[in-house]
Each structure stands twice: as structure tokens, then as C-alpha cells.
Amino acid sequence: MSGKVQFRPHHFLCALGFQGKGYSHGFTANMAGIVDRLRAPGGDAVEIEVTFQADHICAPCPHRRGTSCENAGKISALDARHAAALGLHDGERLTWGAAQARIVAAVPEGALAQLCAGCQWHELGLCARALSDLHARR
């Protein structure tokens, strides 16, 4: 995938904490490709466009329903909390480097319990470890 990447607001932290787990093989492979691009040298310059509909990560998700999700209520709530915390707006564009700086500035360690409430992946602690590592690097 070249060019900009579209992310729902909650996917900024999902991309940060991704460790090869997902809803299906297709979903996991797609997300790994996106995250590998962000983590590669020069990945901080990748442009991300914010959307409140299905994004590039959602593309092969088995829960996707058109531009929405079968869990739309839960996903919309996650997106609303993440957008508010990170100051993200529909259609906004920023680089992955700028997104990480915003995460560090806006999401202190320990904030994910409230921010990610209802997310099945939160319990694994992957995002909390990734957030802690990001704070330590910055």
C-alpha cells in the first residue's frame, strides 16, 4: 500500500500496540502490512487521514459491514473517546510521527483502561506496553 493510510480514531493506538493478533488471517496480514510500513525507517512520515467509517485496517475485517461494523455502537464509542483524547477530526491529515507525538502528549500511561473500555484486545496489555515504550522513547 502506498500513499496515505486511512485510520479510524481508535486505530492510532491499535497500530501502536499491534503484535500480530487479529480477527482473521486476512485481517491480521493486512494490519501487519500497515503497521510494518509505519514501523519501517521513514514510517514517521507516512500520512494518515482520519475517518469515522471503515478504514484501511477494517478492509478485510470479518465484522465489517460496508462502511460500518456489526459492532458499530461499541466501535463508535471507542472512536469518540479516542478522537476527543487525541483531538482528531474527520478528514484531518497528519503523519505517523505527529500522531505518536500527539499520543504521548494526550494519553498518559494508565489512561487506556478508560479510553479503551470495551475493547477485547485491551485485556492482553499489548497497547499498554506499547504506550509505555513510546513514552520512554520520547
Image: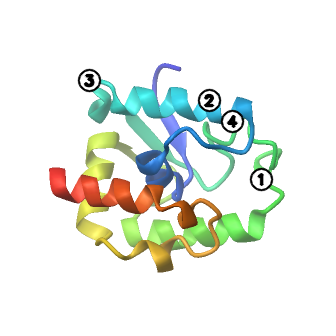
Distance CA(mark 1)–CA(mark 3): 32 Å
Which residue is denoted by mark 2 in the rendering?
A: 30
User: Which of the two residues, 8 or 39, is positioned nearer the viewer here?
Assistant: 39
**Under tag 2, what secondary structure?**
helix
Tell me the number on the disc at residue 27: 4
Say whether residue 73 is left or right of residue 94. Answer: right
Distance CA(mark 2)–CA(mark 3): 19 Å
Q: Picture coordinates of residue 102 (x, y %)?
A: 28, 59
Evaluate whether residue 2 shows in this view.
yes
**Under tag 4, what secondary structure?**
helix
Residue type highlighted by circle 4: Phe
Q: Picture coordinates of residue 12 (x, y %)?
A: 45, 52
Say whether residue 75 is left or right of residue 32. Answer: right
Say whether residue 4 is left or right of residue 129. Answer: right
The vertical placement of 55 against 115, above or below, is above
**Under tag 3, what secondary structure?**
loop
Distance CA(mark 1)–CA(mark 4): 15 Å
